[in-house]
């Protein structure tokens, strides 16, 4: 496969992931509300919607070749910024069933490859 085509597919896959996550912030906000760190000011729903907007904006930036470099960097920053919410989710799920715990704790190490993927897309943008 052509390397440029492969990079484009990878970028579009990341854009789709971010877009789907952004949409779920509006379609089913309650799970996101529950993991908003308590230290943030305001209502959790505001942060849920704001992060949904951010994910949709970053998805668009990654999808468009002209903004892909900035989009990749923004995606890496976004994945870093939501890490505290993922930690909160893992801690909140300590007393749940094995499946829920595995998903919550499994998200933590997943952030590193997501950050690397986003940075790789940003670096390889033309």
Image (tube, grey):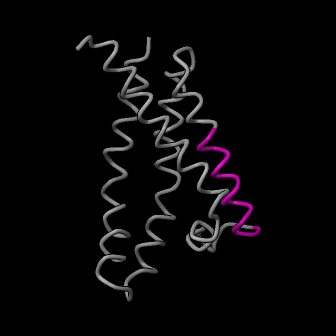
Q: Quadrant of residue 12?
A: top left
In the image, what residue occupies the spot 39% across and 42% down?
115
Front-lying residue, 72 or 29: 29
Q: How many marks?
A: 0
State left or right for residue 32 relative to residue 79: right
Please tell me whether residue 54 is drawn above or below residue 67 in the rendered image: below
114 in relation to 83, above or below = above
Q: Is 87 within the magenta?
A: no
| Image quadrant occupied by the N terminus | top left
| 23 lies above or below 63 | below
Image quadrant where one finds the C terminus: top left
Q: Residue furthest left?
A: 1
> 101 or 23, which is in the foreground?
23
Residue drawn 34% across the image and 85% down it: 97
Residue at the image point whose x is 48% and y is 38% from the top: 16
Decide if residue 124 is on the left or right side of residue 42: left
Q: Quadrant of residue 55?
A: top right
Q: Position of residue 102 (x, y in %)?
A: 30, 72
The reply to whether the magenta stretch includes residue 44 is: yes
- The picture places residue 24, in percent across and down from the top left corner, at 59, 55
The residue drawn where x is 72% and y is 66% is 45
Region rendered in magenta: 42-56
Where residue 54 sits: x, y (%)?
A: 64, 44
Q: Is residue 33 left or right of residue 6?
A: right
Q: Nearer the viewer, residue 105 or 14?
A: 14
Magenta stretch, overall SS = helix
Residue extending farthest bottom = 95
Q: Position of residue 92 (x, y in %)?
A: 46, 80
């Amino acid at each position: 496969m052509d390397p440029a085509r492969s990079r484009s597919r990878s970028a579009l896959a990341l854009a789709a992931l971010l877009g789907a996550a952004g949409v779920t912030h509006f379609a089913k906000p309650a799970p996101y509300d529950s993991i908003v760190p308590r230290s943030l000011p305001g209502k959790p729903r505001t942060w849920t919607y704001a992060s949904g907007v951010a994910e949709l904006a970053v998805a668009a930036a990654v999808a468009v070749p002209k903004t892909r470099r900035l989009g990749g960097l923004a995606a890496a920053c976004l994945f870093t910024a939501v890490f505290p919410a993922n930690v909160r989710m893992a801690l909140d799920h300590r007393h749940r069933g094995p499946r829920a715990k595995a998903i919550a704790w499994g998200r933590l190490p997943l952030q590193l490859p997501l950050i690397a993927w986003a940075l790789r897309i940003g670096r390889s943008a033309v």
